[in-house]
């Protein structure tokens, strides 16, 4: 399956605003983040990052949903 | 309760109006403002971006939590886009019967916004350089 992941903050600037990732089966959130790290060649970039849907932040072991937007979020800095 | 995340300039009076109640004797207002210097560097502007659908839900959750915890009425708004020095980036208003709860609800909400809202800030400097500011990881599980 192919996933489209949006990237925000410095992740978006470093890796592009969107990534398309292919998986042999439905992946867990940590596997999607690992795929982004592998693709970038800079694992440190993903330190502290999480995967999120429009509703919630996913835990590392959560299976990614089959529909809806998916985003990789670096540490937040609002205010 | 009222929350919003928008590109348009924030209006403190709208937030204040949304927490008014005849039973309230106190209102606290926090306004976060883009400053001209940070860590010795001269700032020309700050650019904010958000994962908006989640940010809207998280902001509503934060406001609900502050209202329940302190028995106050709370409103909050966060600005997105490029802001000049002196512009408001975030506003929290809290109204309650007495001042203690208003101050505490306002303080609690802004601290949670800084720790949990999926928003990112890039400082732009007078010399043409820029940098993303460090933040708080959402891996703590608050939004799960």
Image: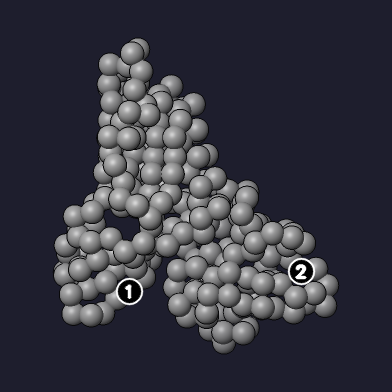
Chain containing mark 2:
A
> For the residue labelled by badge 2, is the local secondary structure a helix, a strand or a loop?
loop
Contact between labelled residues 2 and 1, with CB atoms less than 8 Å apart: no
**Where does the image place residue B94, in percent across and percent down from the top left?**
34, 30
Quarter of the image where one finds residue B76: top left
Q: Quadrant of the N terminus of chain A?
A: bottom right
Quarter of the image where one finds residue B123: bottom left
Residue for badge 2: A27
Taking depth in this image into account, of B75 and A52 the one nearest to the observer is B75
**Where does the image place residue B143, in percent across and percent down from the top left?**
58, 48
Taking depth in this image into account, of B75 and B99 the one nearest to the observer is B75
The CA distance from mark 1 to mark 2 is 33 Å
**Where does the image place residue B99, in percent across and percent down from the top left?**
27, 22
Q: Say if B45 sits above or below A13 in the image.
A: above
> For the residue labelled by badge 1, is the local secondary structure a helix, a strand or a loop?
strand
Residue sitting at x 62%, y 85%: A39
One can see residue B135 in this view: no
Residue sitting at x 32%, y 16%: B24
Residue sitting at x 34%, y 39%: B92
**Where does the image place residue B38, in percent across and percent down from the top left?**
21, 64
One can see residue A33 in this view: yes
Residue sitting at x 52%, y 39%: B61
Q: Give left or right: position of B108 versus A58.
A: left
Q: Say if B37 sits above or below A79 in the image.
A: below
Residue for badge 1: B131
């Amino acid at each position: 399956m192919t996933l489209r992941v949006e990237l925000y903050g410095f992740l978006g600037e470093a890796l592009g605003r969107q990534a398309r990732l292919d998986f042999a089966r439905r992946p867990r959130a940590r596997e999607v983040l690992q795929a982004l790290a592998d693709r970038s060649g800079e694992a440190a970039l993903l330190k502290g990052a999480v995967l999120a849907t429009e509703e919630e932040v996913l835990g590392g072991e959560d299976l990614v949903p089959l529909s809806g937007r998916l985003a990789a979020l670096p540490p937040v800095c609002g205010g | 309760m009222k929350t919003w995340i928008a590109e348009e300039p924030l209006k403190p009076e709208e937030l204040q109006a949304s927490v008014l109640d005849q039973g309230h004797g106190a209102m606290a207002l926090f306004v976060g403002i883009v400053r001209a210097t940070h860590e010795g560097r001269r700032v020309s502007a700050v650019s904010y971006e958000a994962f908006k659908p989640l940010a809207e839900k998280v902001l509503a959750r934060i406001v609900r939590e502050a209202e329940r915890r302190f028995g106050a009425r709370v409103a909050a708004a966060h600005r997105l886009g490029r802001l000049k020095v002196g512009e408001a980036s975030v506003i929290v208003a809290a109204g309650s019967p007495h001042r203690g709860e208003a101050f505490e609800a306002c303080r609690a909400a802004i601290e949670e916004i800084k720790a949990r809202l999926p928003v990112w800030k890039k400082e732009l400097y007078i010399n043409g350089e820029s940098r993303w500011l460090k933040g708080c990881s959402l891996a703590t599980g608050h939004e799960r």
